[in-house]
């Protein structure tokens, strides 16, 4: 119903779009509509997309990524060196200052690390920083990061940890008036209404082009679209694929999420590898990309690992659509008419219900007796990660913020992973070996092997790497990034 | 009177407590807030540590006793989502919702009386038929859809008003009108029906026979008589608006009120914020009930307060 309404609105909006006058020209000030307001502006406590969308412009991290996802030094002067199995040494960039004048140095790194891992702060980000033991100052611009065990992902982790000013973190209002080293400074926040940042003229990387940016918080996608069409917004997030034809400009970029079904390899029907292969062969992924995503999704190649992540096996291909072979395999396995329960949720990820129902439809074609069970989200989380029996097939759009395959491996492929549905001890051993392997080439080879195994044994049914679509006003020029960070310093206004 | 207020307040406290306790139990039964709050890939140990920090590792009875103790001192704990006192979030958003309701319901009340009265004077006439048709539409259209259509027409096409957000008086117009349409329809129909009833009563005929003008009859007798049912229906609408309509309207118009906050709190499994919101809304509803009773008594002294 809601979708129908959106479509109707889009239709009306499309008709009216032609009559729109161009937006008023306010040089170098832009307005961005995001889906949810930051819960806090403290950069170290919450795992919150709204908070990141703003704070990514205010704060910086030791490591950064290029728009295409390559890990490069940020506040670090160069890539870190490994001193021993559990110690990484970072040289820091010289002459960097926080917005309040405090210098950025080893003390700032030590304070930032100490605060985020302090159990008293109960930071949700510990999911990313669980292996970090301490940061130790070597000299003013050198700092050692010590991990609890060998941790090859530490540099990627430091791409996620925002550096705070040590003095300000003691007596300042971190939650309400952030102070970072980034290209934009905090200006004002009217809770519920808007939030404003201004350019940092003393930014070490050069002053950004856009002078100030105002964030608005608009949950409803139809309302965000309307605001873009009426000229109130310059950039809107999460534009629905079907709206791309209505907006003045848009940009689509591969995102962090990959949709996948995890198959229960010990379940009565899906324990047969032939059945699992049939499930992979039965889906016309190309048709789904066109039909559901208007082309704005990429077919996942053989695994649920993000293509931009370290460890992605680029040599695998996705299973072709071959319904005849799928039917034959089901017959061969003697599974015709046997039940298959497909578990999923609705409304959390882009077109989740549509993907689940389309796939369930394809699977029913193979001769299996397919039922779909769309659950309320917290119930679904219990099916996904709880202690109960594993579902035959469960849908997830898995996100990989750190862009390292470790996360997806441990979560879905490792037999003890929260969302894993297999009991393959050999695979678990490989994943554990990779977790500790600090030799980059060897670690990559391990990941390649694990993905090949997962692909050949059909532990999962990978679907799509979803694209993030941003709507933009005519005057905006911006190429969004693969890590979904909205860096205003990379945006331009043409007028 | 004073005794009545005290008694009702006491009953009200029981109601508020009952509702809040129900929310306490339900929120803990339906889902695990830790799973909702942490990234999907958080480890078991991290989940356990998080649960311990917010006290969710305790047996539910212990949690409940602590909760009761805290509520007695009006301490609702910290919002998990915003990491600040939950009651602070509620009091920050509540005025926005009250402003929206005042504008929306205010418009509905002020328009419905003349519209209903004029319709009642000439049932089947042009004004009546027009009012009834629009009223039926107002009742039939979902506010979600109505809001989006209003945005497309008045903000995107005509550019008279902003699409969403809060700030100037112009920002208030579309959400308030969207909010007002359903109550307006209900009020107008109610005023019309009771008015037709009243106008057919013998006292009106007597008054007219004595030569009193229609306006005077309406003002002095009829309107006063329909005021009591009108008060109770507007109380009902006020409660529905507070606990329902605002959720939809605030979401569509990105209005930073309590309704939108409630939706977000539920999505994020923010138990503590939900408890605070429900507590405050339940308290307001009890208060509205008491005020309505007193108002009705003031309008119609024959009424017994009990």
Image (cartoon, coloured by chain):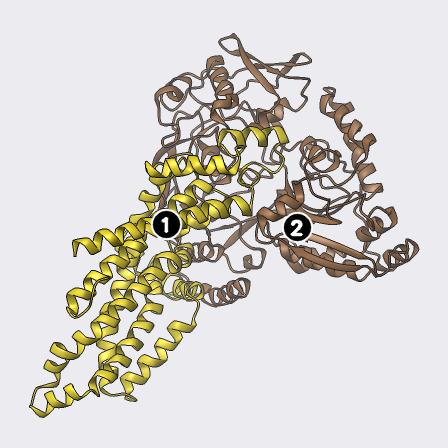
Chain colours: A brown, B yellow
Relative to B154, say whether A490 is above or below: above
Left or right: B112, with A195 as reference point: left
Q: Quadrant of residue A167?
A: top left
Q: Is residue B264 visible?
A: yes
Left or right: A252, with A412 as reference point: left
Which mark is on residue A18? none
Which mark is on residue B258? 1
**Residue at the image point whose x is 58% and y is 17% from the top:** A133
What is the spatial separation of the Cα atoms under label 2 and label 1, in whole angstroms? 36 Å
The quarter in which the N terminus of chain A is drawn is: bottom right
Q: Nearer the viewer, residue A34 or B143?
A: B143
Q: Nearer the viewer, residue B42 or A313?
A: B42
Q: Position of residue A352 (x, y in %)?
A: 63, 53
Q: Position of residue A105 (x, y in %)?
A: 47, 14
* Number of marks in the rendered image: 2
Relative to B1, say whether A45 is above or below: above
Considering the numbered disc 1 on the image, is that residue within a helix, a strand or a loop? helix
Front position among marks 2 and 1: 1
* Chain letter of the residue beneath label 1 in the structure image: B
Q: Position of residue A474 (x, y in %)?
A: 46, 52
Q: Position of residue A240 (x, y in %)?
A: 55, 55
Are both tags, 2 and 1, on one chain? no
Crowd around label 2: few <14 · some 14–19 · many ≥20 (10 Å): many
Q: Which residue is mark 2?
A: A297
Left or right: B32, with B189 as reference point: right
**Residue at the image point whose x is 74% and y is 20% from the top:** A439
Query: Which residue is most to the bottom?
Result: B209
Query: Which residue is most to the left?
Result: B211
* Chain letter of the residue beneath label 2 in the structure image: A
């Amino acid at each position: 119903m809601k979708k129908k309404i959106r479509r109707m609105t889009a239709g009306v909006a499309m008709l009216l779009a032609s009559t729109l006058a161009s937006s008023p020209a306010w040089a170098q000030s832009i307005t961005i509509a995001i889906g949810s307001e930051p819960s806090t502006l403290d950069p170290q406590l919450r795992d919150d997309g709204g908070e990141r969308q703003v704070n990514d412009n205010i704060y910086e991290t030791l490591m950064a990524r290029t728009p295409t996802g390559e890990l490069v030094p940020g506040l670090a002067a160069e890539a870190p060196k490994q001193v021993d199995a559990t110690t990484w040494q970072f040289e820091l960039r010289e002459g960097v200052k926080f917005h309040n004048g405090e210098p950025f140095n080893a003390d700032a790194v030590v304070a930032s690390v100490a605060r985020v891992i302090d159990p008293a702060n109960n930071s949700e980000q510990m999911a990313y920083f669980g292996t970090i033991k301490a940061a130790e100052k070597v000299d003013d611009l050198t700092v050692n990061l010590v991990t609890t065990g060998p941790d090859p992902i530490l540099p990627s982790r430091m791409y996620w940890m925002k550096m705070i000013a040590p003095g300000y973190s003691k007596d300042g209002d971190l939650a309400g008036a952030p102070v970072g080293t980034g290209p934009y400074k905090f200006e004002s926040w009217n809770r519920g209404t808007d939030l404003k940042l201004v350019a940092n003229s003393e930014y070490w990387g050069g002053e950004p082009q856009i002078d100030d940016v105002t964030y608005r918080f608009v949950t409803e996608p139809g309302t965000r679209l309307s605001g873009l069409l009426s000229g109130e917004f310059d950039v809107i997030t999460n534009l629905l694929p079907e709206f791309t034809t209505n907006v003045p400009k848009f940009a689509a970029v591969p995102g962090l999420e990959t949709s996948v079904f995890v198959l229960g390899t010990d379940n009565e029907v899906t324990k047969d590898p032939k059945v699992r292969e049939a499930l992979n062969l039965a889906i016309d992924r190309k048709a789904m990309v066109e039909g559901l995503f208007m082309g704005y999704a990429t077919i996942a190649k053989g695994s649920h690992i993000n293509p931009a992540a370290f460890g992605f096996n680029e040599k695998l291909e996705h299973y072709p659509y071959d319904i005849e072979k799928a039917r034959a395999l089901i017959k061969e396995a003697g599974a015709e008419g046997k039940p298959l329960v497909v578990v999923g949720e609705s409304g959390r990820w882009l077109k989740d219900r549509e993907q689940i129902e389309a796939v369930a439809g394809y699977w029913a074609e193979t001769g299996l007796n397919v039922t779909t069970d769309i659950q309320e989200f917290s119930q679904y989380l219990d099916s996904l990660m709880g202690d109960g029996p594993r579902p035959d097939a469960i849908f997830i759009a898995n996100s990989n913020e750190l862009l390292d395959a470790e996360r997806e491996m441990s979560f879905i492929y490792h037999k003890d992973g929260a969302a894993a549905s297999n009991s393959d001890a050999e695979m678990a051993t490989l994943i554990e070996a990779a977790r500790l392997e600090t030799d980059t080439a060897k670690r990559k080879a391990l990941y390649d092997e694990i993905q090949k195994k997962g692909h050949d044994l059909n532990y999962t049914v990978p679907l799509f790497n979803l694209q993030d679509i941003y709507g933009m006003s005519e005057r905006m020029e911006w190429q969004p990034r693969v890590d979904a960070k909205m860096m205003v310093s990379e945006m331009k206004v043409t007028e | 009177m004073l005794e009545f207020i005290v008694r009702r307040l006491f009953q009200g406290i029981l109601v508020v407590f009952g509702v809040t306790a129900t929310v306490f139990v339900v929120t803990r039964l339906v889902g695990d807030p830790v799973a909702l709050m942490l990234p999907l890939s958080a480890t078991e140990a991290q989940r356990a540590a998080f649960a311990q920090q917010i006290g969710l590792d305790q047996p539910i009875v212990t949690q409940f006793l602590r909760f009761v103790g805290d509520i007695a001192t009006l301490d609702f704990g910290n919002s998990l989502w915003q990491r600040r006192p939950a009651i602070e979030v509620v009091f920050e958003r509540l005025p926005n919702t009250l402003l929206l309701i005042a504008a929306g319901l205010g418009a509905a009340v002020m328009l419905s009386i003349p519209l209903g009265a004029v319709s009642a004077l000439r049932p089947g006439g042009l004004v009546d038929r027009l009012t009834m048709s629009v009223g039926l539409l107002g009742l039939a259209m979902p506010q979600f859809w109505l809001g989006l259509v209003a945005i497309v027409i008045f903000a995107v096409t005509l550019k008279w008003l902003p699409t969403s957000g809060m700030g100037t008086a112009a920002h208030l117009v579309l959400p308030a009108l969207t909010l007002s349409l359903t109550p307006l329809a209900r009020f107008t129909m109610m005023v019309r029906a009771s008015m037709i009833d009243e106008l057919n009563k013998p006292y009106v005929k007597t008054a007219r026979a004595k030569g009193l003008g229609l306006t005077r009859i309406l003002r002095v007798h009829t309107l006063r008589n329909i005021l009591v049912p009108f008060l109770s229906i507007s109380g009902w609408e006020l409660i529905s608006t507070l606990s329902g309509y605002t959720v939809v309207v605030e979401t569509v118009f990105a209005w930073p009120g309590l309704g939108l906050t409630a939706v977000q709190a539920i999505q994020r499994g923010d138990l503590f914020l939900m408890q605070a919101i429900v507590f405050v809304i339940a308290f307001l509803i009890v208060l509205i009930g008491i005020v309505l009773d007193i108002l009705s008594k003031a309008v119609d002294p024959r009424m017994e307060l009990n």
